[in-house]
Structures are given as C-alpha cells and as structure tokens.
Amino acid sequence: MNKLLSAFCLVALFNLLPGRMYAQNSCDDITLTEALKKYELGDFESVLALINPCIETGFSSDERVQAFRLLSLTYIAIDSVNAAEQSASRLLKLNPNFEPTVFDPPLFIRMINAIKQAGNRSLVTSVSKKIENAFEAPAAVIVINNEEIKRRGYLDLEAVLADLPGFDISHTYAATYSNIYQRGYRSNNTDRTIFLIDGVEENDLWANIAYVSRQYPLSNLDRVEVVYGPSSTMYGANAFVGVVNIITKDPQDITRGHSFGVNAQLNYGSWNTRYTDVTLAGKLKDISFSLTGRKYLSDEMDLSGFPDYDYSTDYYDSYNYFNRLKITTDAAVYITKNNLPASHPYYNIIKDDLGNTVSIELTQEGAKAAKNKDKYGLKQIVNGSPVRYQNITDEWLLYGKLKIYDFTMGFQTWKKITAGTNYFTDNRSAGGDNGVTWIPYQTFFYLNYENRLFDDLIFSNYTQFKVHSIDNDSRSVNISNYSNGLLGLADLASGKDAFWATEYYYQISKQLRNELKFIYTPAAYFDMIFGIEIRNSQLQGNYNIAGNPWPSDSAYASGSPTAQGSILGGNQYDIKDWGTYLQTSYKPLEFAKITLGGRFDYNKIRVFGGYGLQFNPRIALVLTPGNFIIKTIYSEAMKDASNWTKFATNPTRLLPSPKLEPEKVKNTEISLGYRLADDLYTELIGYRSVYTGIVGTKLVPYNGGTTAQNFPIGSLEIRGVQAQLNYKYNNYDVYANYTFTDPWNTEKDTKIRIGDIASHHANFGINAVYLENLNINFRINYIGERKTGPGTTVPANLSKFPSHIIANLAVTYDNFLVEGISLQGICNNLFDQKYFDPGVRSADGILYSSRTPQRERYFMLRILFGLNY
C-alpha cells in the first residue's frame, strides 16, 4: 500500500508544481498581433525579437502554434530554410492536425505536408491514449504505416507482426488462423496482447482470444502501432504483454482534397485465394464518411500428404494398444465398476501371489480387435462424405465511420468461417467436408465526442457496444476410438466400434463500455491525462453444446451436471468493471521527461465474485540529448482470467475455477536509440519480465476419480533484447531487426524452458524505387530453433523445429496504365523452404497436432486503386 500511496503522491506533487524556474515575459495574443504586423511590414528582425523570448513558456498552447507558424514564415522570408523546417516541425508536434491555408506561401505548404508525411512514423496514440512523439513515449513502440504495408506486400495483419521484433507465431490456418506470442509468453491462444481497431478492443469478450486473421481490410489502414510491455496503466486488465492498435484512415486521407475517393485492392493467387478490399470515402464541409468492405476466400494449402492429416489407417499398425488399454490403477475397482467378466479373449486379469488384482492387460487378440475397430472408424462415411482432409476460409468484414464536427460514429461487423481442423490430428478430428466448422462473429458500434474545452484542456467521451459470439453452425466432428483414449478396455470388451460424433456450439457475450477522458496541457513542459472507464458486460460461462443445430435454443451448458450445479445463477454472468487512471508527464529540462502513471481497476461478477480492487503503476524517464533517445521504464499489469478459463469445462476438465485471481507481471526495461534526421534510426532494448499466478491445469479428485482443473500453478521469468535499424539512402530504404528471448517457467524453484519460443529472430528488408514508378521489396525472416519436448513447457511435443530462413519478394508498378492504379506481384517463401510450426496447446501428437506444415512457395497478384473525384 505504501508503494501505491507514494506513486500517487508523486503524481499529485507534479500537479502542484508551478512550473520551471524560467524567466517569464508578458506574452499573449497582443504580442502575436504585433509580431504579425511586423511580418506584414517586412520587419523580420522585430518578429524574431518579439516571439523568441515567449516561445517556450509565455504563450498558451494555441498561441504557441500560431507563434511557430509565424516563425516558420519569417525564416522562409529571410531564406533560413532549416530554421523554418524546425519551427514547422515543432508546430506539428503541438498540433498534428494543423492545416496551412491557401494564402500561405507555397514553400510553407509543401514543408508542412512533407513533415506530416515523414512524421507519421514518429507520432503515436496507443501508449498514453493521446498524440505524442514515439521517441518520447513512455514505452517501447513501433509504427508501421500504410505505405510500408503496401510496398512490402503484406497480405494480412499477421504478416505485419511476423516482420517485427518480439513476436513468435504458430500458424495453424485453423479456427484462430494462428497463435501470436509476444515477448516470449506462450499461451493457449492469442490472449495476452490486446488488439484494437481505432481504440475498440477486438479480443473476444468471453475467451479474450484475438482472431487476427484475413478478415481485416488493408485499403483503409493508416498505420499499425505496436506497444511492447505491460500496459494496464492505461488499458486495465489484459494489456499484459503489449498492445496492437490498428488505426484506420480518416475519410479526408482518402478523398485528398476532393469530394469523393476510393481505395481498393483486388487479389488472386495460389490455392484459389482471392479477396476484394474496398474503401469508399466522401467529404462535404465538416461532414465526412468512409465505408470499407472486405471479402476473403481461399481453399488453403492441401495438407493431406502429411502424417498428422492424411487419415491413413497405417498409423494403427504400429500403435501400441497394449500400453494404451492396460489398467494398472485400481484394477479391481475397474472390474467391479464396469462389470467385466473374469475371463475374456481380449484381456487377462493379473493377480499377485495373494490373489489380489493388480492389473488388466490386453491380449494379442484384443490388440488386433482394437486396431481393426480404429481402422473401421476412418473408413466410415461421415456427414455424407468420406473422412479426409479439407480446409477452407471464408471471411468478410464491413466497417463504417461518419464524422460530423466533433462527433465520430463508427461500426464494424465481421464473420470468419474456417474448417478449423488443423489444431487436431486425423486421429481426433474429421475434415471440412465432414462438417467441421468454426464461426466467430463480432459486431461493435461506437460514438466518440472530442472537443477542446479550453486552450489547455481536451475532453472526450467514447461509448462502445459490442456483441461477440460463436455462431450456431459452429461444430466439431470428432472420433472416439481406442488409440486416442476416448474408448477404453470396457468398451472393447463390450464390442463397441469406433464412432464419430458431431457437436454444435454456441456462445454469445455483450458489453457496454464508456470512457471519459481529459487531457490537460497547461504548459509545454507539463501535461496530464485522466480517465474514468465503466464496463457492463453479460458474458456466457460455458459453451452451449448440442447434437443438433441451433444449440442456442436446444443445448446444455457443457461439463458435468455436478460442476455446473455448483455455480448458482445459470450460464450467463453479469460483470461490472470500473477503472480510473491518471498519468502525468513533466519536463524539468528540455531533453528530460518524467512520466508517472497509475490505474485502479475494480471487478465484480454477480454479487460474490470478481477480483476486487487492483492497482497498476508505470514510471518512466525519457532522455533525448542531441540525437540520442534513452528510456528507462518500470511497469506492472494484470491478466484477468477469461470466462472461458474460469467457467468452461470439457471432457478432460470437468471442474470450473470461478475464483481465479488475476495473473501479475512486473516489467523493467531500458532502451538506447539514435536518430539522425529521417535518414537513420537505430534502437536497442533490454527487458526483464516476472510473471506470477500463471494459470494452468492440474489433476484433482473428482467423482471417485480425477479430473483437470485450472489453478494458479507457476511463475515465469522472461528476459529479452530487441534491436532495430531503419536507414534511408537515396531511393533505398533498409530495415532490420533482431530479437533475443530467454523465457523460463520458474514453478517450484525449478527452471523449465518455455516451449515453442525461438531464442533468436531476425528480419531484414530492402526497398528500392526505380524509374519513379517501379518499387522492388525483398524481405528475409530468420527464425531460430524452437525447442519443445522434455525439459520444456510442452513436454509431449517430440517434434523438432530447426532454424530456417524465409525470403519474400514484392514488385509494384505504380500508375499502371493510368494514374492512381498500381499492379503488384508477390512471391512468398521465394526459395520454397520446407518447414513446420509447432502445434498449439499440448501439441501431444494424439489430440493436438504436434506440428503444422507451413506454406510452400506461393504467388499473389494484386491490383491497387487510389482514385479521387
């Protein structure tokens, strides 16, 4: 508690500071008026004499913007172009939305536009929920803008992240498309990083999964901001290892001074992959709109030639049924419970010298019978088709935005349909033709009002309503047989055949959220942001499951009746969250900024549940002497267990865990950067993150036997280094980044290497422009060995994942035939490297596939439009 009080006392002390001990002058709008008169008379020395003494401390925020504009105009008039650019640059730092008038000198207009274009990379909003320079933001952050996304030939958002430091990705091309692990934290799903679209969280309300797939459009993408490290100070629960914010274009970015504009992409390529991605925008005075639609279809790469997906009966010829079906624990109880006869051709009952039953062992005839029954399972017709591998992707998204004066209204709805079978082996799940389908469906609406109440105070109110669901037609088609353990010795004795079962799933969750925010900037050296956030949610506890369609109406909540009966109130949970945050930044020196922040969160589930009150602080010191940027950051965060983790059960985890406490992390990092104008930037970051209360499963007594249940079972310590370089020379742009990750599970004072996470990653790319219109981009991704198996947190995955290098090429020709149309050819995995990604979750090779084959060399052809009317 002392730490909390100290942090907030320091914040309060900064709020009371009267300012730095600078000489004060009589500086106001009268001074600006006088300076403007001197400028119009051509008395430029007097302009500088009037404004310069006031520029740092005398003017208000709006007056400083006008002062820098007048300084820039004056420097242009006396041919001091460098000084004019510096003043224009500082102007845009104060007001990134500044627009010159048609009466301003052409050089000033070009200067402002050029600085804006170059400066987009250095302006971020995701760290502190306000516009700030990335080099001074109190976090490690990387920005990828729309031009880089286009030139590099990225086909989806996941490809963008794969090219950045700090990410490990397991592509499955299944229900979630891939699992994305940031800064070495391996989890069951992509659920430790918050994904945002224009500030609205995309993570599923029920399971916290982010479905970062191919449904997201690129034609309306302005930039992607990636924040590294815990961010609960601003975002509350679940901003555990970082934040990815996808920021869409304002309508005027598409109309470009016209009344109407259109951005579009048309794509066709390997595996009959095709998508259409179109954004329409219009502007009339103070009203503007944009509407974006994307449709993505693909037959996906055929994996039927690989052992985990070939549905070959040969697998059973070498399977050890003797070990699988042997009973060694409580064998006598097993006999009594299942009413087994004392003699049977499929098994022998083994007794000790005293006549006590010690085990039940399979005979050769029993092993043969189990094998034949398993083979019979793969030869069945299931839901009208032979059992075989097949995967599809069918995804769409619609996004709209309307701006009227200070109001912005928006909506988004998307749906993705995948066969979803790649998570599992062919000894567990059937293919897409047999009915396997997973269909997440999400919709949100938002209304944002933002206005400058005073020169130094900005007010905003952001209201969101979200509905996240798993569609009624989502279904699994699974086999129960003897080799996968879902049929046992008693079933074999009764002559039971392997069989397939289709189950339909349904889940729906809703949330209304409101965030009230104030940004107070009384002086150039001090600012404060304060916010209050309220969320009212109704989240499902467990899947509704049925053997027939429409489980929303006819299903039961999955899990045992005993487990569900222990949770009063049904399968829908009313959840209330309150949060309040305060962050303040103070510059005691021009090159030094101190940031202190903290957030209180309170969570209540119904009457008796929830994690109660939590606090997460952030402290940062940022130094910018000359061309150097030095950051020292300490931050904490929490990860609230999702409803899926707390309340959902399955055949192997029959007990829920409604009282799980949040996971916690304490993160310390330091970075050193060097920037030389816009031509060169390099940065080196080192960090150490300590996680506690990590949730996992362990066996507990249940109903005369055992079952799994979620518990806080361990802790993690992850250290790492991230480095990046961006260099521009003439018509060449070069980027490179490197990641070293040292992740360990430190449960019970022992260290076990976190599986699936490579120690070394490196990415390199070069972009070249020739003859003005021809752009060639070449990228290389190096992924080091990803260890699994004994001695790691994925001990059952015995596959090997050696290091490999993937090369990608994108060639773009702009103004093809007519201005505004580009033609792009893409070849990914240029040298046809054969490689695999680790499977998800246990990746045991029995239930979950231990490895997923990755895409061979593939081609895409795109036509890109950017037209205005």
Image (tube, grey):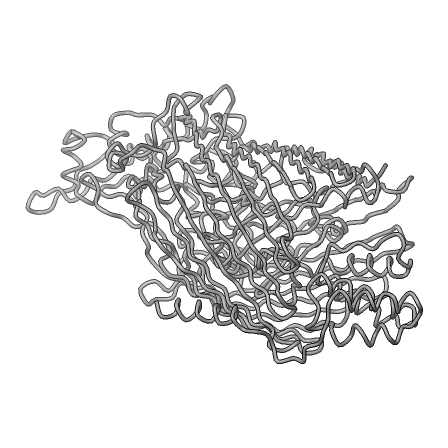
463 shown above or below 366: below
Q: Quadrant of residue 295?
A: top right
Position of 28 compared to 299: left or right?
right
Between 831 and 81, the residue placed more toward the observer is 81
Residue at the far top in the pictured view: 384
Position of 293 compared to 191: left or right?
right
Image quarter (top left, top right, bottom left or bottom right) of the C terminus: top right
Between 860 and 638, the residue placed more toward the observer is 638
Where is residue 628? Give x, y as percent: 67, 76
Position of 284 compared to 715: left or right?
right
Q: Quadrant of residue 722?
A: bottom right
Image quarter (top left, top right, bottom left or bottom right) of the N terminus: bottom left
Q: Residue at x 61, y 36 (%)?
A: 411
Position of 520 compared to 858: left or right?
left
Q: Residue at x 51, y 52 (%)?
A: 193
Q: Quadrant of residue 172?
A: top right
22 shown above or below 553: below
Where is residue 464? Give x, y as percent: 54, 40
Where is residue 792? Give x, y as percent: 42, 59
Where is residue 416? Give x, y as percent: 57, 34
Q: Residue at x 44, y 38 (%)?
A: 315
Residue at the far left in the pictured view: 354
Q: How many marks?
A: 0
Between 268 and 457, the residue placed more toward the observer is 457
